[in-house]
Image: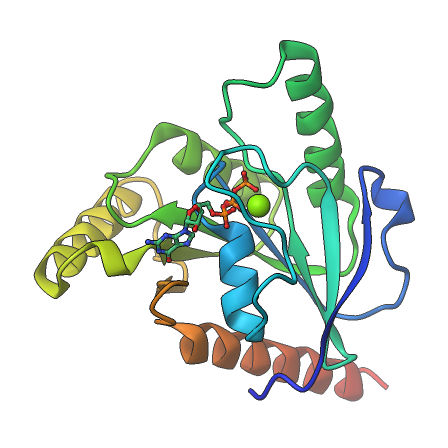
Amino acid sequence: MKIKSADFVISNSDVSKCPSRPLPEYAFIGRSNVGKSSLINMLTNRKSLAKTSGRPGKTQLINHFIINDNWYLVDLPGYGYARVSKSSKKKFQKFITNYFEQRKQLVLAFVLVDIRHDAQTIDLDFMEYLGVKEIPFGIIFTKADKLKPKAIERQVDAYCSQLLKTWEALPPYFITSSSKKIGQEDVLNFIEATNNEIEDLRNKSF
Ligand code: GTP
Ligand code: MG
């Protein structure tokens, strides 16, 4: 898919105030600092569409971006960031779960995991939560530039084995690096194919 336009729409913490156009939407979630905002910039060929930082906890709101005027990308705050206060962590959790449970346009969540780390309970638990809520998800391995090809393969294999302990089938997954621009085509083609499937289904139902 070619990115013809990528524009910021709105930030907020209230799902009812998210954009109302009935367009397919893809959300990026994962631990703080895993590279969600950087990935959005890489996918859209923009340097600073989404704000990034070396310090965890940069993204604090639900951020909508509209791509090619026909689908949304959503940058979300990270989970598992210890340095925010307990009360603001609770507020965070509430608006994020409200987003996942109420956002009708949400087609699929991409759960980002750092390819250097073994499967973490917090991520597996979040996938479990998405499963319970029947929200489709894919996995995006980030920061692949930090490992050699053999190590990438080893990490991905280990992750898949871990998933197959609890899941019957593997979700779609992608290996990416925002700094080396790895995986852009794979992720965008997947989104394009999914958008086309939705369009076909819509046309068939009329
Ligand atoms: P929060 O908004 O705090 O939840 O973080 P985030 O998941 O949006 O992470 P962000 O994109 O801000 O990136 C965090 C740090 O990781 C920054 O220092 C980025 O430069 C770095 N980073 C992100 N992606 C990559 C990557 O593919 N490779 C490398 N080497 N570093 C990356
Ligand atoms: Mg961010």
Residue at 50% x, 19% y is: 82
Residue 128, percent from left and from top: 47, 38
Q: Is residue 187 left or right of residue 96?
A: left
Compared to residue 24, the image places residue 201 above or below, namely below
In the picture, which quadrant includes the C terminus? bottom right
Q: Nearer the viewer, residue 178 or 173?
A: 178
- Locate residue 183: give its quadrant: bottom left
Compared to residue 153, the image places residue 185 above or below, namely below
Residue 7, percent from left and from top: 75, 70
Residue at 55% x, 82% y is: 193
Q: Nearer the viewer, residue 169 or 103?
A: 103
Q: Is residue 70 left or right of residue 145?
A: right
In the picture, which quadrant includes the N terminus? bottom right
Report the label total.
0
Compared to residue 28, the image places residue 81 above or below, namely above
Residue at 72% x, 83% y is: 199
- Locate residue 194: give its quadrant: bottom right
Residue 119, percent from left and from top: 29, 38
Residue 39 seen in the current view: yes
Residue at 40% x, 59% y is: 171
Q: Is residue 58 left or right of residue 65?
A: left
Compared to residue 150, the image places residue 44 above or below, namely below
